[in-house]
Image: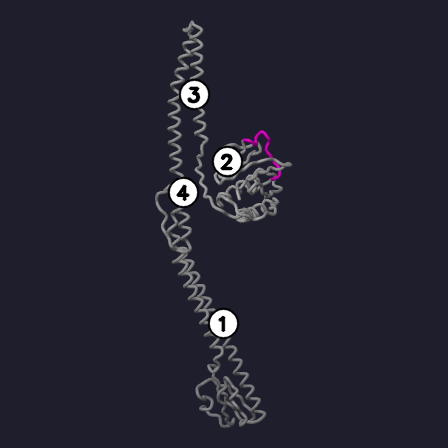
Amino acid sequence: MKSFRTFTAAVLWTAAAIFIITNLFLHSNSQNKENRMYRVETERLVRQIAADGYKAVRLTDCQYVYHVERCPAEALTEDFLAGTGSDAVFRQIGESVYRFDYAVQAASLGKRLVLGVDLALGALLLLLVFVLFYVRRNIIKPFEAFRDVPFALAKGQLAVPVPESRNRFFGRFAWGVDLLRESMEQQKKRELKLQRDQKTLVLSVSHDIKTPLSAIKLYAKVISRHMYADETQLKEAAESIHTKADEIGEFVTHLIKASGEDFLQLEVVQESFYLSQLVERTTAYYDDKLRLLHTEFIVEHYADCMLQGDLQRSVEVLYNLMENAVKYGDGRAVRLTFSEEEGCVLVTVKNSGNTLPDAELPHIFDSFWRGSNAGSSTGSGLGLYICRTLMHRMGGDIFASPQDGQMCVTAVWRI
């Protein structure tokens, strides 16, 4: 707020300086013009008197000179030279001296111009003051209420609600920030619950494993000490060890399955949207990005139609596929193609170079898995896993295949 007050003061002082300089310039220019004009009128009257005599003088056409008086040169008096006390010009024509009384105030055009400019500048100054006051009251001051919100969110202070605002400039912003806070709070709760569940699962499984493991160790000790002389007892001990090992295997399988369950809590909203909305939002972002990377971006022709799913999540899927094409391609070209099959629309993202070996294709959509073409590129291995999860929840599908030296990943939406 302090910097804004400084800025406001600087703007107002600048506006006042412009106002003063403009007035000085117009006044000076007006005075110079008026000085020139009364001299022009005087010289015209001098020529008229010299040619036609004193009686021919007509002041109706004069704007500055309003009185002319004649006096013989030998009869000059102080009263004549003093005149009416106004400004005067003296000229000798023949044997007489003429006094031309003039008034600069008689020319109101310059004053009207100055007045008009003053009014215009005054109105602009008032408008500027109003705009600055409006910005301070409706933008700067309300925004100060959100000044500490990002720091609070960064520190994990998620329970404090965002200040409400009905301001038309920040109403949606405040709603969005509060929605972000609630989402982060829910995510934090889910993570805590997941951690508790995982810890509980590990403790439970480790406890359950102890019993068959103890039995296996016992049978192994008995066998190692040759305590079973009967072949039948040895066979029963071996079968018991096998059974207990199967129990441990089931626990491990359960643990692996639990760890592979959905930990991202991805939610979708089933709705209808146009294919053009999905394509336009994708191309609007990647046109500029790929141009900066000097990568050719080709979007093939498509027939617009209605798709079923979540538009925001669909954009997220296509963004992920485009990011992979940019990250793992050779940078020459990225192509977006479209086709229709059995009541579905197929959108394919193709990138040249860096295709995956056939042996790795079945794992491309697994969580935390990264292909051999990842190289030194950073990543978590979750992008395509998230895409597959979202597409399945929207009733669609996704698959990948190399074609003619290109990596092709296709997302399928229901019409």
At label 4, the amino acid type is Ser
Q: Earlier in the sequence, mark 2 or mark 4?
A: 4
Earlier sequence position, callout 4 versus callout 3: 4
Nearer to the camera, 230 or 341: 341
**Residue on which the image places disc 2:** 385
Number of residues whose C-alpha sits closer than 10 Å to that of mark 1, classed few (under 14), some (14–19) or many (20 or more): few
What's under tag 3, amino acid-wise? Ile
Q: Are marks 3 and 2 in contact (CB under 8 Å)?
A: no
Mark 2: few, some, or many residues within 10 Å (few <14, many ≥20)?
some
Q: Nearer the viewer, residue 172 or 97?
A: 172
Looking at the rendered image, the quarter that the N terminus falls into is bottom left
Residue 378: x %, y % from top left:
52, 36
Instruction: Report if the CB atoms under discs 1 and 3 are less than 8 Å apart.
Output: no
Marks 1 and 4 in Cβ contact (< 8 Å)? no
Q: State the residue lying farthest toward the left.
A: 160
Identify the secondary structure beneath mark 3: helix
Regarding mark 1 in the picture, which secondary structure is present there?
helix
Q: From which residue to which does the magenta span run? A: 351-362
Separation (CA) of disc 4 from disc 3: 39 Å
Residue annotated with mark 3: 248
Secondary structure beneath dot 4 equals helix
Q: Is residue 355 magenta?
A: yes
Distance of label 2 from label 1 (alpha carbons): 73 Å
Marks 3/2: CA–CA distance: 29 Å
Q: Are the residues at dot 2 and dot 1 in contact (C-beta closer than 8 Å)?
A: no
